[in-house]
Amino acid sequence: MSISLFVLIGFIYYVLAAPTANEPLQIVTARADTSRSFSVDKHVDKVLSFWTDDKLKAARPVMPNRKLNAQSITKLQPITNGPLGFVDGTIGSLQKAAVEAGIVSGIDQNDPSSIKVFSGTGRHTYTVGKIFWNITANSYGICSGTIVTAGNKDTIVTAGHCCYDHDAKKWRINQNFIFIPGYNNGAQPYGKWAARAMTAYSSWTVNQNYNYDVCFVNLYTNSKGQHIQALQGSEGLGYNYPRNALTYSFGYPYNLQQGQVMQYCSGKAAASKYGNGFNGQTIPCDMTGGCSGGPWFQSFDTTVGVGIITSLNSFIINSIANYMNGPYFDSSIWSLYQQCAIK
Ligand SMILES: *[C@@H]1O[C@H](CO)[C@@H](O)[C@H](O)[C@H]1NC(C)=O
């Protein structure tokens, strides 16, 4: 290939990659390929049995420090985008049983490092989990995700970059992609769940526009035919929520306890300094790779672990350590959610 053609392709790519205000939104979905198994059950078995304890422990963030360079440090004007709306969270049968047994706890505010993930019944300990897939036959990636209320009762939300590999231009759905709610240091208290489909906007998969770094994943039911939401419950999802709000973020960052334990950070959101047309917000947070896709909650009740997801962990700006950026959930993210909640 001649050098000039190379440059031209590079130029075309740049033009396509540059986010524009009026980018047409197109929903794109990838489904699990079950054709090489005799049945869907066999396919799910194969995916779940791929994951030995050793493999789960060996998994690493694909980009340990997902840091982007700020293009221009500008304070973006908050934009309003229609009326606020939300879907509420739901309680699952497991949390209900625990509450009835009198076991209730959330986050100990006096000891932020001791998130009482497994001693209590805060909703987030059932709904937030760790995501795994294999990068090659013997290397494995991680992200974080959350069960959201959905008609199909098997939907999780995570980051677009957790579902779609831009280097390989490929969805990760057929790379043994699984979700483990409440993962804790190798323990899988509520089992492993295999992915059935994943959906995002082409603005993410094609254009890598960080305003759309969002993916909804539909899971298969477990071997008893139970839906994840029926057992674990779900968190609510909101759109057009107020900016600059107190926000709680959760995830499994590799920089803290090697991603083996659910962590959180909290603080007031502010306009992101990424520039480059990014409309999202930033929160003070020391989590790095592995927490990608983990939820940002507003109206988070720390005693019961219930809140409304209004963004997620997406990226860190190179020159601004200890701040996490997340896309602003507006009406377009709500449209994407609505499509996925019925798939
Ligand atoms: C993931 O692991 C499976 C099973 O070992 C293997 O067949 C597949 O090629 C791996 N995926 C990639 C992308 O290497």
Image: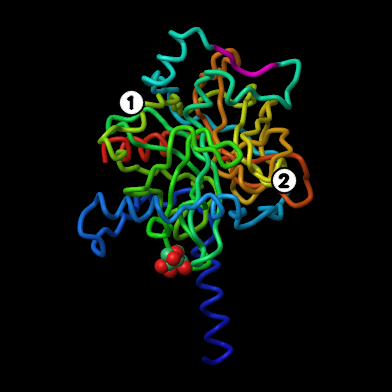
Q: Is mark 2 within 8 Å of ligand 1?
A: no
Number of numbered discs on residues = 2
Q: Which residue is mark 2?
A: 255
Residue 18 rendering spot, x and y as whole percentages: 54, 59
Q: Main secondary structure of the magenta part?
A: loop
Residue 65 rendering spot, x and y as whole percentages: 69, 53
Q: Which residues are magenta?
A: 104-108
The vertical placement of 153 against 31, above or below, is above
Q: Which residue is mark 1?
A: 230
View quadrant of ligand 1: bottom left
341 vs 188, left or right, is left
In the rendered structure, which amino acid carries the disc numbered 2?
Asn
Identify the secondary structure beneath mark 1.
helix
Q: Is residue 322 magenta?
A: no
Residue 199 rendering spot, x and y as whole percentages: 37, 48
In the rendered structure, which amino acid carries the disc numbered 1?
Ala
